[in-house]
Amino acid sequence: MRYRSFGDSGQAISALSLSLDDDTLRPTQLNDLVVSGLEAGVNCYEARAHDHPALYAIGQATASIDRRLVIVGLRVPLETEDGPRALDRGSFIRLLQEALRTSGLRWIDYLIVEDPQPGEIDPAFRATVEAARQARRLRFVGIRGDNDTVDHLLADAAVDIYAAPYNLRASWATRSRIRTAIHGGLCVMGYDYYPAVVRQTEAAPEAAPRRRSGLLGFGAARAVQSLPERPGPYHFLDRIREWDADQICLAYALTEPSLCTVQLSVASAEVLTHLTGVVERELPAGVPAQIELARVADLD
C-alpha cells in the first residue's frame, strides 16, 4: 500500500480506502472485510449514518490499533432510516453520539454530507460542527456529490473535504470542481472509480443461437455464444493482458495526484485483495492514451 497526505492534518491516508455500504453483508463479513483491509494497509474506513453493523465492525476491528493511525468517516445520505436527513443542532448531535456509541470510538475523523441541499450547510450547522470539534468528537466535515450547492460550497471553501465521483468518464465540470477544491485548500477524495455505464453488461441471449458445423458440414456443431458488451469506446478494457477492467479503471483513478485516496465499495475480502494489488502496479504502456481517446469519443 502507498500513502498520501490527508490534507493539512499531518496524517497519512492510504491510497485506497473502504466504504462499508453493502447492505447484503452480515456482521461477520463486515468484520472480515475491515480486517482484510487492515492487513492490506488500508487505514481509512467510512460507514453511513445509522448503519450500526458497519460502525460496530469498524470499531471492533480497529480496537487494538493506535486510534491516530486509523481514519474513520461517517457519511450522511440524503435519506436515512428515519426519513429525510435533518442537520439541525439536535439531530446532528444525536447522529454523532449514536455513531460514537455504536463504534466505541472516541472521535470521528470526518463527516460527509452527501448531495448537500440549499441552506443545509448554514452558519448554524457550522457552529454545531465547531462545537463538536472543540469537544474533540469530530475533526473535519465535507461534502459529496456534483450538484449546484456543491459548486457554491466549494467556491466559498466552506468545508474541509470534497468527495468527487472521479473515473475515466469524469466530466470537465467534475475536474473543475476538483481544481476549485484544491485551490481552496480542501482534501479531495475519489469515489465511483468504475462507473456503471462502463461496467460489463451481459448481452441478451439469442432465441435461436447460430450454430457452426465442422469441415464440409460434418462434425459436432458449436453454439456461437453471445459475448458481454461494453459501450463502444471502452471495448479495449477487456483486451489488456493480465489486467481486468476493474483494475484498469482503479489504476487510472490512482494516477490523479489531486486525490488523497480512492474509495472502494466491495462485497468480499477476495475482491479487496484483488484490487489493493493495483496500487503497486503501473498501467501498461499505451493504455493511458487509449483511455484519453475513449474519453474524447465518449464525451463527444
Image (spheres, helix red, strand yellow):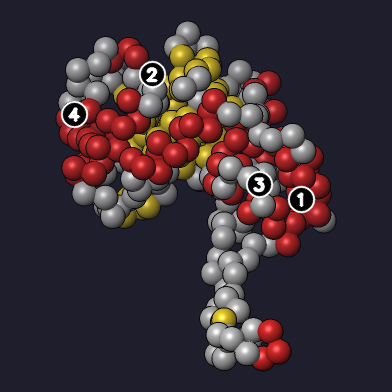
Q: Is residue 153 visible?
A: no
Quick one: label 2, few (<14), some, or many (20+) residues within 10 Å? some
> Which label's residue is closer to the chain start, 3 or 2?
2
Residue position for label 1: 294
Mark pair 4, 3: CA separation: 40 Å
Q: Nearer the viewer, residue 21 or 239?
A: 239
Amino acid at dot 1: Ala
Could you tell me how far apart the alpha carbons at marks 1 and 2 are, in whole angstroms? 40 Å
Q: Is residue 281 visible?
A: yes
Q: Residue tagged by mark 3?
A: 240
Quarter the C terminus occupies: bottom right
Which tag, 1 or 4, sits closer to the chain's start? 4
Going 27% across and 30% down the picture, which residue do you hit? 35
Element under disc 3: loop
| Type of the residue with mark 4 | Gln
Q: Nearer the viewer, mark 4 or mark 2?
A: 4
Circle 2 sits on which residue?
139
SS assignment at label 2: strand
